[in-house]
Image: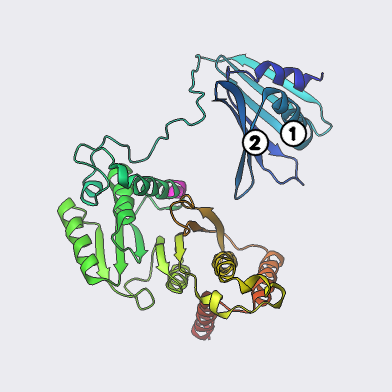
Amino acid sequence: MNQIEELLKRVLTSLLVDMVISGARGGGDFIKIKVRPVMIRDSLYFQVSRYTDKQVFHENMTAEDALETLSGWILHDFRQAQIRMQDEMVTVLVSKKGKATVKSKKAACIETQNLEHNRKKQYIIEEGTAVPFMIDLGVMTESGKIIRTRYDKYRQINRFLEFIEDILPELPTDRTVHIIDFGCGKSYLTFAMYYYLKVLKHYDIRITGLDLKQKVIEDCQALADRYGYDGLQFLCGDIADYNGTDEVDMVVTLHACDTATDYALYKAVKWHASVILSVPCCQHELNRKMQCETLSGAFQYGLIKERTAALMTDAMRGQLLEMKGYKTQLLEFIDMENTPKNILIRGVKSKGLLPKAARKQQMENYQKCRDFFGAELTLEKLFKEMEGEMAYEQN
């Protein structure tokens, strides 16, 4: 048994707090590994989480399986490991030649932990704290208790705030942050966003909610006025026609129907928004247009064609945003069991342009995808028009 295997045999116990294996050597799919102990049906397992740039994969292993697997990763695929025990800190460094150096020191204080696999989740808006908009929107009682039949909405609100929390470093702190929520509807998430950023995080913030339904807008504005949310304004209007500003820090669009999402993404890019958060809905355009002889047998089933079109629409939107200088991720918003409209497109504006060769490759990848399905998205047309306008202005 080698040095690393001996170490892992010693630490893969209930005394382990966590382990982070990082410093990928290159060529592999994963950039880091996280390990923590969990109790499943009174047996000790180790939850191994493997991270790529855009996804995380979880697997529960016995100590025996984890020892063999982790040893290989540490010695051959990564450069270091940080192991945190309840009473000890261990650092492992691996040289290019595969020589491992292990350093250990006693922890300053003894850590304790909950090994239950399904630990109670800590939500950003905690149950037990009465929040006025959550009460008025029927999610919470006046005592702060979540109404049982609205628990899915409560989880959805908190899941959305987790995405907001992730992008806080992209928002300015020395001036007013301007956010537009296109197709805000009843504005559960608009109010949540304002409450989180203004009340909990103390940002100087201005949020504009836009929707086509006049009555909905009037009701939302009345609530905002009652709460004293003076930085929250609701307007009635169409996304495609909105020209109320020339500068926005973040654009949010949740369940904007069909090509309304394209117009929202186009506006965000045109305004050079630092952050885009979009949960598309009813992606009909590609379903109507796409022609793919290779998949014609599969597409005779309407359900398969509809779902393929929805997924590919959002994938192509993501590619188009990448070409406009946004680091783009397609993430699971909420569980599929709650709604099939569960993909969130998150775009964060890059600090600089990619090399010319990389941009060319992005364009070629998108064109191959577009040509395979034989259809051009509204978003691509809007970007072409924008490029034409920019060229005209420069001349």
- Whether residue 170 sits left or right of residue 2 in the image: it is left
Are the two marked residues, 2 and 1, in contact with CB atoms closer than 8 angstroms?
Answer: yes
Q: Which residue is mark 2?
A: 33
Q: Is residue 11 above or below residue 358?
A: above
Q: Secondary structure at mark 1?
A: helix
In the image, taking residue 166 as reference, residue 15 lies left or right, namely right
Residue at figure coordinates x 47%, y 72% from the top left: 262
Q: Is residue 11 visible?
A: yes
Residue segment shown in magenta: 165-169
Quadrant for the N terminus in the image: top right
Is residue 336 found left or right of 126 in the rendered image?
right
Of the two numbered discs 2 and 1 on the same chain, state the one appearing first in sequence.
2
Q: Can you identify the residue that label 1 sits on?
A: 73
Q: Which amino acid, by three-letter code, is at mark 1? A: Trp
Q: Let me know if residue 383 appears in the view.
A: no
The tally of labels here is: 2
What is the x, y in percent for residue 258?
A: 45, 72
